[in-house]
């Protein structure tokens, strides 16, 4: 049976970093992160569908995130009660853009009545989830999913430290151990044709989040060139042979796509 999992430490640091980045950016009036509570059939065999969204949360500060996900916080207790998972959407949203999207959705309704008005909260979160990723590259992130192959276990002598803000490089994340070595190899591979300054950008702005089957790399968008796609299978076989890598469905070529990626925040 899978163990409980919490990535609050990493995601709190990440949220704090991004909130600080956009604090003086006039294009963000009321920035927030979206948290989605999902119940899965894998965890609940009697569920008739593969998964369903039970609830949404909008988080407007890292302190609010900490409170909601504390051992007695609302998100933690709700997930425990419903045997569901909390997923953290890594692209920051803005309330004004969400409301505009919400008004567009409302305009598509054929009539307004008490029943449709009851759908307004859900409409808000649907509109937020459908927002295009923010324009600025340093506020936009993809999630790369690495799953351990069957039977693989992390070596006992490899420490997997929680990510923390690196005091020597403000805004940078660092972590030690086996998982981080995979992250570094992956970044070296996807940035092999970039100048050193641009390569450093990916090292500074990426970090890992543990999952039950492996881990996620949270990273700014990178160019899926023909060469990268061509050489990726060989890279995985040579350098990351103990993993299966999944680039989530939203990540295709690059432009004009919705990047609504999420990573696991809490699992009971």
Image: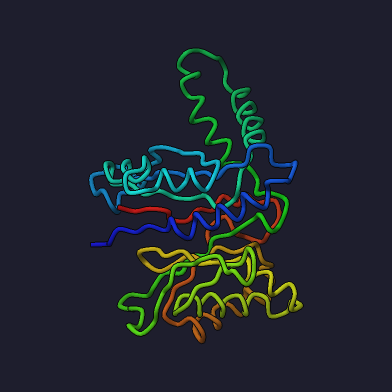
Q: Position of residue 21 (x, y in %)?
A: 67, 52
Relative to 220, say whether 238 is above or below.
below
Query: Residue 205 in the image: x percent, y percent?
Result: 62, 65
Picture residue at 44% right of the left edge, 48% below the top: 66
- Viewer-proximal residue, 163 or 40? 163
Residue 173, compared with residue 177, is above or below; it is: above
- Locate residue 152, reporting x and y percent: 34, 78
Please name whichever residue, 8 or 114, is drawn nearer the observer in this view of the structure. 8
Name the residue located 31 percent from the left edge and 42 percent from the top edge: 77
Question: Where residue 96 appears, x then y in whole percent?
Answer: 66, 33
Residue at 66% in and 66% down:
222
Q: Nearer the viewer, residue 207 or 126?
A: 207
Q: Is residue 216 left or right of residue 127?
A: left
Q: Which quadrant of the figure has residue 151?
A: bottom left
Q: Residue at x 55, y 57 (%)?
A: 14
Within the image, what quadrant is residue 189 found in? Answer: bottom right
The relative height of residue 49 versus residue 119 in the rendered view (above or below) is below
Please state the total of marks drawn on the protein image: 0
Q: Is residue 245 left or right of residue 82?
A: right
* Vertical relation: 27 (above or below) 117: below
Q: Is residue 104 left or right of residue 144?
A: right
């Amino acid at each position: 049976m899978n163990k409980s999992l919490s990535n609050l430490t990493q995601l709190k640091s990440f949220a704090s970093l991004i909130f600080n980045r956009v604090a003086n950016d006039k294009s963000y009036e009321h920035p927030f992160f979206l948290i989605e509570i999902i119940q899965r059939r894998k965890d609940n065999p009697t569920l008739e569908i593969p998964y369903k969204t039970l609830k949404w949360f909008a988080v407007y500060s890292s302190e609010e995130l900490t409170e909601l996900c504390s051992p007695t916080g609302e998100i933690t207790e709700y997930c425990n009660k419903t045997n569901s998972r909390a997923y953290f959407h890594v692209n920051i949203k803005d309330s004004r853009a969400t409301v505009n999207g919400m008004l567009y959705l409302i305009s598509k309704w054929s009539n307004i009545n008490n029943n449709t008005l009851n759908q307004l909260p859900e409409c808000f979160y649907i509109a937020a989830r459908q927002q295009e990723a923010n324009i600025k590259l340093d506020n936009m992130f993809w999630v790369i999913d690495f799953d351990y192959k069957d039977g693989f276990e992390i070596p006992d002598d490899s420490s997997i430290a929680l990510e923390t803000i690196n005091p020597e490089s403000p805004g940078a994340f660092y972590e030690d151990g086996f998982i981080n070595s995979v992250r570094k190899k992956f970044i070296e591979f996807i940035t092999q044709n970039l100048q050193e300054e641009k390569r450093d950008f990916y090292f500074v702005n990426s970090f890992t989040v543990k999952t039950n089957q492996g881990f996620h790399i949270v990273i700014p968008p990178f160019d899926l060139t023909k060469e990268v796609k061509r050489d990726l299978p060989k890279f995985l076989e040579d350098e990351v042979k103990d993993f299966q890598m999944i680039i989530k469905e939203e990540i295709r070529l690059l432009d004009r796509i919705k990047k609504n990626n999420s990573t696991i925040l809490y699992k009971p």
